[in-house]
Amino acid sequence: MRCIIITAGVLLLFCFAPCLLADGLYGDFTGDNIVNAKDLFEFSTLWLAEDCDPNVDLNGDCRINFYEFSAFANNWQLTYTPSPATPQNLMVPPAAFDDSSITLIWSKPSVYSNVASYNVYRNGSLVGNTTKLFYNVTGLTAATLYSFTVKSVNSSGTELAVSNTYSAATANTPAVFYPEDYGAAANGTTKDTVAIQAAITACTAGGKVHLRSGKTFLSGAIFLKSNMTLQIDGTLMGSASAADYPTMPMRFEGTETTCYSALINVGNTRNHTYGGQISNVSIRGSGTVNGNGSGSTGLIVSEGGITSMRGRLIYMVNASYVNLQGLTLTNPPAWTIHPVYSTQITIQGITVNTVGISNGDGCDPDSSTYIYFFNDTFNTGDDCIAIKSGKNLEGYTINMPSAYIRVTNCIFNNGHGGVTIGSESSGGVNNVFAQDCVVTGNQIGLRMKTCPARGGTVEYITIKDWTITGATKFGINIITNYSDSGGTAAPTLPICRNITVENVTVDSTSVMGFDIEGQSSIHITDMLFKNCAFRGATKNKLIFVDRATFTGCTITASFSQSSCTNIIQN
């Protein structure tokens, strides 16, 4: 018998007695596959809780008590292999919580063919079921620590396996600041820029500036600060006058330059580090941000044709821990959301409508890392999500890749590409993972584009469990001869390698399923196509591709290969 003393409100002495356990590692509350001292605090939150979950209530008395803890302790400092049906990496993405809600995300189990949905638990009690890889837990109490788990469920409703336990706390109840109290008319015709900025200045740490439902706030550029929320439940309408957007250092189409500021700015200077200037910012709500960037009176026209200076709708620079949630974003002067030199960004539940806008990209992560997209809908006048890292020699020299970007449960209705990489990828792009996305009507599903002048390495790109229908050009398109608008070339040629396409269906009768074209000097290498279906496409093509494997794939149209090596079909 082994004993340990811990403190959890009172001093308790637990003696570890051996007992029989069902399969699994009881007591691994931190999800590191080891039961050790780190798990004791997590268990203390369950001590004497009412819970009938058979995974923790081993003796069936609906209470977590000494018997169960002794059973957990029998596995002290042991390791185990989790069930293949275990949901993985349960976490709260960056800044995705407030005083009454917490957003959870997780990854699919290693084997998920028999997983139909997921049950979400809070402190051991079931709070919801979902088929997605995220869940917004609402109705919570401010400044309170909660413990969460997720269980995979089969089509019969039987729970299969439990995730790691993740603990997270809600925010304190915020002080709320209304622009009307600082002089805003909120009538859609009077400019409220000064009043909104005054409310932001007055906002205390952890506070909220609230643009209320049913009101329209006409504004020029506003600048947020650390540790605040901008909640938009009404409409924030951009002014049509360029004079309301002071110029500032930016990066646009891969080059550092001076542009008009955005309507919403998270940071206002620029340096070559990830984050470091502004942090812990949330922009959320049920309302609309309208950049007024289209039409005869829109900002694009009023700039007098200086298109290279167009601002964005939402610009983040050297920012970290930013949450963008729930809003409808429309009519930007150029790109809609543009994180530059930023890290730890959550973009969830937004709808982007920019059809007809020149350069109307949905979101352009640019030399930025750890970006989490989920539950977003894009209807765009250009690429939906376009991942970039600088252009030619400048981007190559700055050498700040975009990396660790996760895209799940997104819908791409209209646009040039659903998920696009490049063409400005001179600083490199790596570790992009996109799963459970639906493409309907885009020109292209997965789009990757570069040219000899770019340089940079693009690698470890995975798309999985996609459905692509109604594409007007290609299901998957990777090219190395994209047009170059000039500038000094990078000193090395680009590298494009390690690309996985798995469980992807392209169902279009009039377009190419895949068109992947390297050059004699730029080969595309190390590709895996697994369990994919390219149905009805007119043709499929590989040029200058080395080491590509097609396993379990259906390709109904012609499949041509030119200057390729080690292409395997099985």
Image (spheres, rainbow, N blue to C red):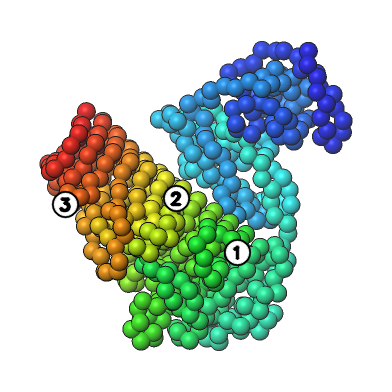
Which quadrant holds the N terminus?
top right
Question: In the rendered structure, which disc, 2 or 3, sits on the residue that comes first in sequence?
Answer: 2
Disc 2 or disc 3, which is closer to the eye?
Answer: 2
Secondary structure beneath dot 2 equals: strand
Instruction: Judge whether 314 appears above or below 406 on screen.
Output: below
Give x and y (percent) for residue 319. 55, 62
Where residue 401 sits, quadrant-wise, is bottom left
In this orientation, does residue 228 appear? yes
101 and 385: which is toward the camera: 385
Q: CA distance from mark 2 to mark 3?
A: 34 Å
Instruction: Judge whether 466 appears above or below 554 on screen.
Output: below
283 and 422: which is toward the camera: 422
Disc 1 or disc 3, which is closer to the eye?
Answer: 1
Question: In the rendered structure, which disc, 1 or 2, sits on the residue that comes first in sequence?
Answer: 1
Q: Which residue is mark 2?
A: 403
Residue at the right extreme, as displayed: 11
Estimate how packed mark 3 is, as few (under 14), some (14 to 19) or many (20 or more) residues with alpha carbons within 10 Å.
some
Where residue 146 sits, quadrant-wise, is top right
- Horizontally, residue 340 falls left or right of residue 215, namely left
The reply to whether dot 1 and dot 3 touch (C-beta < 8 Å) is no
Q: Which residue is mark 1?
A: 278
Give x and y (percent) for residue 253. 36, 67
Estimate how packed mark 2 is, as few (under 14), some (14 to 19) or many (20 or more) residues with alpha carbons within 10 Å.
many
Question: Residue at the spot x=35%, y=82% of the render?
Answer: 306
Residue kind at label 2, given as amino acid type: Ala
Estimate how packed mark 1 is, as few (under 14), some (14 to 19) or many (20 or more) residues with alpha carbons within 10 Å.
many
Residue kind at label 3, given as amino acid type: Ser
Secondary structure beneath dot 3 equals: loop
Q: Which residue is mark 3?
A: 510
Secondary structure beneath dot 1 equals: strand
Question: Residue at the spot x=60%, y=67% of the render?
Answer: 230
